[in-house]
Amino acid sequence: MITVDLRSDTVTKPTPGMLEAMWGAKVGDDVFGEDETVNALEQKAADMFGMEAAIYCPSGTMTNQIAIKCFTQPLDELIADQTAHVYRYEGGGIAFNSGVSTRLLNGYRGILTAEMIEPEINEENIHYPHTSLVVLENTVNKGGGSCYTLEHIKPIAELCKQRDLKLHLDGARIFNALAHTGDSAADYGQYFNGISVCLSKGLGAPVGSVLLADKATIKYARRIRKVLGGGMRQAGFLAAAGIYALDHHVERLKIDHVHSRILGEELAKMPWVTNVVPVETNIVLFDTAQPADAILAKLAEKGIKANSTDTHRIRFVTHLDIHAEQVEYVVDVLKGL
């Protein structure tokens, strides 16, 4: 029986070329700053987004939490969409790690605007937490892979500058967004104080994310990474996979988007599907008449793995280990349910 894992784009295995790059990596002690492959990855990622410096971390949760710690003080407040990964899926780290409260907004599929953000910025008053940070997510996981364009981002960045707020991007799937919008990564650095880029989702590396910022922020971020237990040693073996991913797996993301659109179009034809969220990138969200768990059980019988995100909502995520033949197989199974 064919097995098709659509639970997440984090389930991928390193490609033969990536394994070869890992095997041949030159390594040293990264905590001492002596791992040249880690150093090369950090510089490469920073240059790609027009930022000064970067730090390599084990996970996107760590890069986001380090950024929040760098850009806030205890008793501050950050602004984010109510679906934001930093709020929903990082274990309450905003409060635990930084002592910061969160102002949640209701964007359209997780996308915020300057007009939504501005009235939520607190005036200076001892009764209110100090608003110091805005966090955007691109693509928006809970929004079904919805994307910000740079035209969306520019007025938010201008507002943050006017009101002396920092602006951080949770760019876990930023390259998926760029593949969809056609925007340039190099243009992002002018808008954000921090950018988190995940290497282990659509790009297919086994481990790791990088936080991009200016040199002073990254210097402090290294101290925070150490405190959080993220100071890895001969991490160049993992960093080599990240370099390979940036060199070889960015352009192919468009293939994942094609596969998602095929699945979305076919799901829209199914009588047992009540709604399909518009598909932009590699995430397909759809609602079912029956409970999601019942549908997932039927899919599992056919070797198809997926996750529910609500009692009647299922998520498919395409990635580099999903091929055209597997997409055809999934479509055939969907038709037979």
Image (cartoon, rainbow, N blue to C red):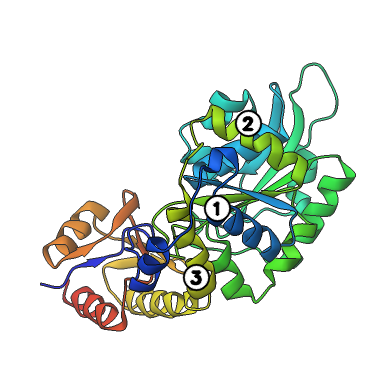
**Mark positioned earlier in the residue sequence (2 or 1):** 1
The N terminus - image quarter: bottom left
Near-viewer residue (2 or 268): 2
Residue type indicated by callout 1: Val
Q: Is residue 67 visible?
A: yes
Q: Position of residue 228 (x, y in %)?
A: 52, 30
> Residue 156: image x %, image y %?
78, 53
Residue for badge 2: 223
In the visual, does 305 lie left or right of 108?
Answer: left
- Which residue matches tag 3? 281
The part of the image, by quadrant, that contains residue 307 is: bottom left
Asked whether, in this view, residue 274 is left or right of residue 166, the answer is left
Question: Looking at the image, is 117 positioned above or below residue 49?
Answer: above
Q: Residues within 10 Å of mark 1 (few under 14, many from 20)?
A: many
Q: In the rendered structure, which disc, 3 or 2, sits on the residue that comes first in sequence?
A: 2
Q: Secondary structure at mark 3?
A: loop
